[in-house]
Image (cartoon, helix red, strand yellow):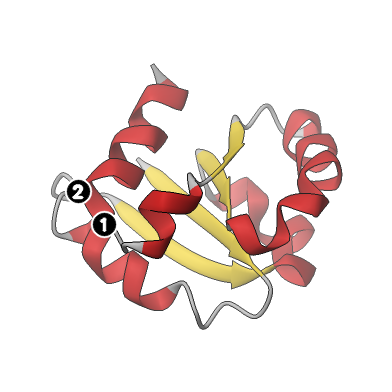
Amino acid sequence: MKVLLICSAGMSTSLLVQNMLKFADPGDVVDALPFGELEAKITEYDVVLLGPQIRFKLKDVEKVAAEHGKPTDVIDMRAYGMMDGKTVIDQARKLLA
């Protein structure tokens, strides 16, 4: 599974990426990128999760993701705030199920 986290700058989410990788399966990929790189990189991923701080961009992300058949959702604010990698990796798995 390849998970793309989209946030405003790609930096605040890096800690969450590390926490998600603790619960990921071997071979899983989790990356964080700024919103501006979404269209160029989306084909490399299976699922897109949007940081709650830019949830206002959800419609834009959904439009791009739909064009590529990629499921997308906003990361739960509580899970994001607690940097709960298990909850967020589980969210990505559910989107792919």
- Does residue 76 appear left or right of residue 79 in this picture? right
Instruction: Name the element at disc 1.
Output: helix
Residue at the image position 72 percent from the left and 37 percent from the top: 65
Residue 67, given in percent of the width and then of the height, sits at 81, 32
Depth check, mark 1 against mark 2: the one in front is 1
Q: CA distance from mark 1 to mark 2?
A: 6 Å
Place of residue 44 in the rendered image (x, y in percent of width and height, measured from the top left) = 55, 51
Q: Which mark is residue 12?
A: none
Helix, strand or loop for disc 2: loop
In the displayed structure, 44 sits above or below 46; it is below
Residue at image location 23% in from the left, 64% down from the top: 19
Viewer-nearest residue: 53 or 93: 53
Quarter of the view holding residue 33: bottom right
Q: Would you place residue 97 above or below residue 25 in this image?
A: above
Look at the numbered discs 1 and 2 and tell me whether their residues touch, using CB distance below 8 Å: yes
Residue drawn at x 13%, y 49% is: 26
49 or 77, nearer to the observer: 77
Does 7 sit above or below residue 4? below
Other residues around mark 2 within 10 Å, as few (<14) / some (14–19) / many (≥20) = some
Please identify the quadrant where the C terminus is shown.
top left
Identified by mark 1, the residue type is Met
Is disc 1 surrounded by few (<14), some (14 to 19) or many (20+) residues within 10 Å?
A: many
Which residue sits at x=50%, y=38%?
Answer: 46
Residue 34 in percent (x, y) is at 67, 72
Residue 39 falls in which quadrant of the image?
bottom right
Q: Which residue is mark 2?
A: 24
Residue located beneath label 1 in the image = 20
Question: What is the three-letter code of the residue carrying label 2?
Answer: Ala
Quadrant in which the N terminus appears: top left
